[in-house]
Amino acid sequence: YNYIIVLNKDEKQYITSENSVVIPNPIDLSDLMADVQAKQVIAAGRLSPIKRFDKLIEAWVLVHKAMPDWQLHIYGQDYLNTKQRLQQQITDLGLDNVVIIKDSVLNIPKVMTDYSIYAMTSESECFPMVLLEALSVGLPIVSFDCPNGPRNIIKNQQDGILVPSGDMQALADVLLKLMGNIENRSVMSKQAKKNIERFSTSTVMKQWQRLLGI
């Protein structure tokens, strides 16, 4: 092949030839805007073990003790009966009133406008479009720094915060810090709307045009 396209620079390490090129997936820019005043955190994705929503729920025990008036909503389609296990975990931890699992939706960016923080706890990600969708509506992100996607989308401490992968205490601490500071959320929200422009459809298509010489 003339070129092998990968979605982020970290993926180039998996290509042994010298013809790999990084071109990310694009997203259309949006006029939608997250409500940074909302006392709600959103997570979304297929309800499967690799997404580690169980870790997010576990961290929410610590969050709930300090911020009992906040809620966590998890959107996604069930896979391998994960939903039932997650719901049982929520019940066992006494979080039924504050952690709610919802069905997947067709227009997640619009749903995201009802939230003030996006949380990601995946074991691994390639190039999660849901993070682009979050940034496109100005939704600050808190994410595990898992291989390899989040660190190539989030600008750490600008539009989101990366925490050590699998560290629930660190995740809870960062969530609480952001939840307790609406001014910080507002600044991150505005920065997210700026930073997402590097993944806009027009910007990414120009990269393809340069590559193909058209």
Image (cartoon, grey):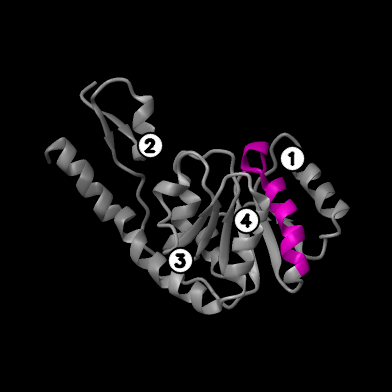
Which of discs 2 and 1 lies nearer the camera? The answer is 2
Label 2 sits on a secondary structure element that is helix
x then y, percent, for residue 205: 24, 48
Magenta stretch, main secondary structure class: helix
Q: CA distance from mark 4 to mark 2?
A: 23 Å
- Contact (Cβ within 8 Å) of mark 2 with mark 1: no
Counting residues from the start of the chain, the first of labels 1 and 3 encountered is 1
Q: CA distance from mark 1 to mark 3?
A: 29 Å
Circle 4 sits on which residue? 171
Closer to the camera in the image, 5 or 153: 153
User: Above or below — where is 30 with respect to 53?
Assistant: below
Q: CA distance from mark 2 to mark 1?
A: 29 Å
Q: CA distance from mark 3 to mark 2?
A: 26 Å
Residues rendered magenta in the picture: 46-65
Task: Locate residue 116: give its quadrant.
Answer: bottom right
x then y, percent, for residue 4: 29, 28
x then y, percent, for residue 67: 72, 71
| The C terminus - image quarter | top left
Circle 1 sits on which residue? 82
Which amino acid type corresponds to the residue marked 4 in the rendered image? Leu
Circle 2 sits on which residue? 10
Which amino acid type corresponds to the residue marked 3 in the rendered image? Val
Counting residues from the start of the chain, the first of labels 2 and 1 encountered is 2
Characterize the local packing of mark 4: few (<14), some (14-19) or many (20 or more) Cα atoms within 10 angstroms.
many
User: Above or below — where is 42 with respect to 212?
Assistant: below
Counting residues from the start of the chain, the first of labels 3 and 4 encountered is 3
Closer to the camera in the image, 62 or 2: 62
Circle 3 sits on which residue? 137
